[in-house]
Image (tube, rainbow, N blue to C red):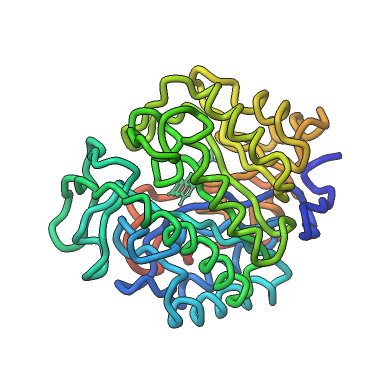
């Protein structure tokens, strides 16, 4: 088995095991509506076995960065349909990554009337870029009231239904990098005293219920989750990530998710070992794999696929380059989040 071997991943038939990792690129418009260049960008990368989209907000409250897309308004759903049709037309598959940033937000990046919410009213230390005023301090979030949580969970269910209406093949819950689900999981950000806080069994409840809602739309074969235990990104700290994630994966076991997308991280937990021990369906691994290491980990038989982020930025035809042993191009770090096609959809494919 290698990177070019097809894979059945839940309900999806992948033509190879080279997955494009989710990457926020800030090319949507100010209303969170995907733009035409996003259809170009994703179509150019459709030779991946599966593309995981940039993080997409399930609600206006879930937005926090500038020019990031949503899946809660009719215009967003219609524009995403154009993107998925482009990808399908080029023979690809596309997963919508649902990303609610919770407290990692600045109000000037959010639509009027939306709120910055989190499990507890504790601000993340840090800043975020805004088009209006440059770097801004992150908002102090409002704690979600107990009776508001069902509505937030329902946003994930509705966004899943919207994703399928927009033609996405599957959805992925973004459950790392300090965003809302990770804020519920971690002891530093979740200081609730109701049934969503306290012991690990309570702190994992939000994630389990979000997944159950997503699965209720069309079964578990089109739902995955992304994790990275002990990831400190966005000022996150959990006193015992091993215990928290053992608990989470035990609770998730019977949901029969199509896949678990695991980022390795040099922290207190061996994330891949933990996932292998606690998850029986397809495992996608990520973070700094090159072609040789990815081939070796697949040959070991312990994982189903490998995802690649940065390599896809400047190598839209990454799969072909690896097939033909062609060298990779470097990307321009200055255009990662700038508007327009430059450094986004204008990286050339190699010609043979
Ligand atoms: C520009 C950029 C944006 C990213 N945005 C997201 C995101 O929206 N959601 C997510 O889960 N990970 C995001 N990531 C992390 C990547 O999915 C991936 O985990 C990381 O790049 C490591 O993989 P690599 O070594 O193959 O690049 C982003 C990474 C980059 C470089």
Q: Residue at x 41, y 68 (%)?
A: 341
Determine whether 255 is above or below 48 in the image.
above
Q: Nearer the viewer, residue 190 or 317?
A: 190
Q: Residue at x 60, y 59 (%)?
A: 214
Q: Residue at x 44, y 39 (%)?
A: 195
Query: Which residue appears farthest toward the top when viewing the image?
Result: 268
Q: Is residue 119 visible?
A: yes
Horizontal side of 206 relative to 273 (left or right) equals left
Horizontal side of 155 relative to 91 (left or right) equals left
Horizontal side of 275 relative to 121 (left or right) equals right
Determine whether 151 is above or below 278 in the image.
below
Q: Position of residue 199 (x, y in %)?
A: 47, 27
Q: Based on the displayed image, in which of its 4 quarters is residue 88 positioned?
A: bottom right
Q: Is residue 310 visible?
A: no
Determine whether 209 is above or below 195 in the image.
below
Q: Quadrant of the N terminus?
A: top right
Q: Nearer the viewer, residue 326 or 77?
A: 77
Q: Position of residue 45 (x, y in %)?
A: 61, 62
Question: So how many labels did they put on this image?
Answer: 0
Determine whether 315 is above or below 112 in the image.
above
Q: Quadrant of the C terminus?
A: bottom right
Q: Based on the displayed image, in which of its 4 quarters is residue 337 positioned?
A: bottom left
Horizontal side of 152 relative to 290 (left or right) equals left
Q: Position of residue 128 (x, y in %)?
A: 24, 48
Q: Position of residue 228 (x, y in %)?
A: 53, 34
Q: Residue at x 60, y 37 (%)?
A: 262
Query: Which residue appears farthest toward the right when viewing the image?
Result: 1
């Amino acid at each position: 088995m290698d990177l070019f071997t097809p894979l059945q991943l839940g309900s999806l038939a992948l033509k190879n095991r080279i997955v494009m990792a989710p990457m926020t690129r800030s090319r949507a418009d100010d209303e969170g509506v995907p733009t035409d260049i996003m259809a170009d960008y994703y179509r150019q990368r459709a030779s991946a076995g599966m593309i995981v989209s940039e993080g997409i907000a399930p609600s206006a409250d879930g937005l926090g960065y500038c020019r990031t897309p949503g899946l809660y308004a009719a215009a967003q759903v219609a524009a995403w349909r154009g993107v998925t049709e482009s990808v399908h037309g080029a023979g690809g598959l596309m997963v919508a990554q649902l990303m609610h940033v919770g407290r990692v937000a600045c109000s000037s990046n959010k639509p009027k009337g939306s709120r910055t919410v989190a499990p507890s009213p504790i601000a993340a230390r840090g800043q975020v870029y805004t088009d209006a005023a440059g770097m801004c301090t992150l908002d102090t979030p409002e704690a979600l009231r107990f009776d508001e949580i069902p509505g937030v969970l329902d946003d994930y269910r509705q966004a899943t239904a919207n994703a399928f209406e927009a033609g996405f093949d599957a959805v992925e819950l973004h459950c790392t990098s300090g965003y809302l689900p990770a804020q519920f999981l971690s002891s530093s950000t979740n200081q609730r005293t109701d049934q969503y806080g306290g012991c690990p069994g309570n702190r994992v409840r939000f994630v389990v219920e979000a997944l159950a809602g997503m699965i209720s739309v069309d079964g578990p074969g089109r739902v995955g989750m992304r994790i990275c235990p002990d990831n400190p990104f966005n000022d996150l700290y959990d006193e015992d990530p091993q215990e928290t994630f053992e608990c989470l994966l035990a609770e998730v076991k019977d949901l029969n998710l199509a896949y678990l997308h695991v980022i390795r991280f040099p922290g207190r937990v061996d994330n891949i070992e933990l996932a292998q021990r606690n998850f029986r369906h397809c495992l996608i691994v990520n973070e700094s794999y090159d072609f040789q290491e990815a081939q070796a980990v697949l040959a070991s038989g312990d994982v189903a696929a490998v995802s690649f982020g940065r390599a896809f930025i400047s190598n839209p035809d990454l799969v072909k380059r690896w097939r033909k042993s062609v060298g990779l191009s470097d990307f321009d770090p200055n255009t990662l989040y700038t508007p327009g096609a430059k450094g986004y959809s204008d990286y050339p494919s190699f010609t043979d």
